[in-house]
């Protein structure tokens, strides 16, 4: 897993590999700190950790992943896809069948520039909403973010708690980098 960041309220308490961050968050949990959030720095998704037990028990839970449905050896999860009959016919004719073809198409789309920008934008939005949704000028900053008004985002976030602002601007900076590359 990529690096993670943990916040207690609006304070960044740890950043780095998940086991290190989880133990720092566990210590904050034990101290009674409220509103603990841990983010995957790549995807912006929140990571849920069961803090019950001592630090060794928390570390052990992280080492053993939860059971999965689907084909566990491959990390496959079964879901439903709705397509027209002509789509199913085309997929059935492809090498490897429907599932392999769909995986190839998804991977190709994700590798594309627009796909990577969209993933970065979604990650930044997740963090922005979770960490700053209750802060002044959040809605204006969110609109400026989606309008790619980068200087306005920086101005609107200038009064936010420093750790939140820094992390949010770092995540937004990944989206901004795509725009700068497009301008070249």
Image (cartoon, rainbow, N blue to C red):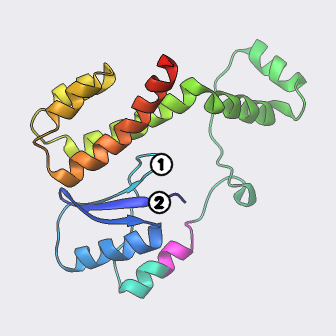
Is 38 drawn above or below residue 152 in the view shown?
below
Look at the image and tell me in which quarter the N terminus lies: bottom right
Q: Are there few (<14), some (14-19), or many (20+) residues within 10 Å of tag 2?
A: some
Which residue appears at 31% of the width and 71% of the height? 25
Pointer 2 with pointer 1, Cβ within 8 A: yes
Q: Please give left or right for residue 131 compared with residue 83 in the image.
A: left
Q: CA distance from mark 2 to mark 1?
A: 7 Å
The percent position of residue 169, horizontal first and vertical second, equals: 30, 41
The percent position of residue 165, horizontal first and vertical second, equals: 22, 46
The residue identified by callout 1 is 42
The percent position of residue 30, horizontal first and vertical second, equals: 23, 80
Q: Is residue 65 magenta?
A: yes
The residue identified by callout 2 is 3
Q: Which residues are magenta?
A: 60-66
**In the image shown, does 26 or 166 lie closer to the viewer?**
166
Residue 56 tag number:
none
Q: Please give left or right for residue 77 compared with residue 97 in the image.
A: left
| Label 2 element class | loop
Which residue appears at 17% of the width and 26% of the height? 140
Q: Is residue 57 magenta?
A: no
Q: Residue furthest front?
A: 184
């Amino acid at each position: 897993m990529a690096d993670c960041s943990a916040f207690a309220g609006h304070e960044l308490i740890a950043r780095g590999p998940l086991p290190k961050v989880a133990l720092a968050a566990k210590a904050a949990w034990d101290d009674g700190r409220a509103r603990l959030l841990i983010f995957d720095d790549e995807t912006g998704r929140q990571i849920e950790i069961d803090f019950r037990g001592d630090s060794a028990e928390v570390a052990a839970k992280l080492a053993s992943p939860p059971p999965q449905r689907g084909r566990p050896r491959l990390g496959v999860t079964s879901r439903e896809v709705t397509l027209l009959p002509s789509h199913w016919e085309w997929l059935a004719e492809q090498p490897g069948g429907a599932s392999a073809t769909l995986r190839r198409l998804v991977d190709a789309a994700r590798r594309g520039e627009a796909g990577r920008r969209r993933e970065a934008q979604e990650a930044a939005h997740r963090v922005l909403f979770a960490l700053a949704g209750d802060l002044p000028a959040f809605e204006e900053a969110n609109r400026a973010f989606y309008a790619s008004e980068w200087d306005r985002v920086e101005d609107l976030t200038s009064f936010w708690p420093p750790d939140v602002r820094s992390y949010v601007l770092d995540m937004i900076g990944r989206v901004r980098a795509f725009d700068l590359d497009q301008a070249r």
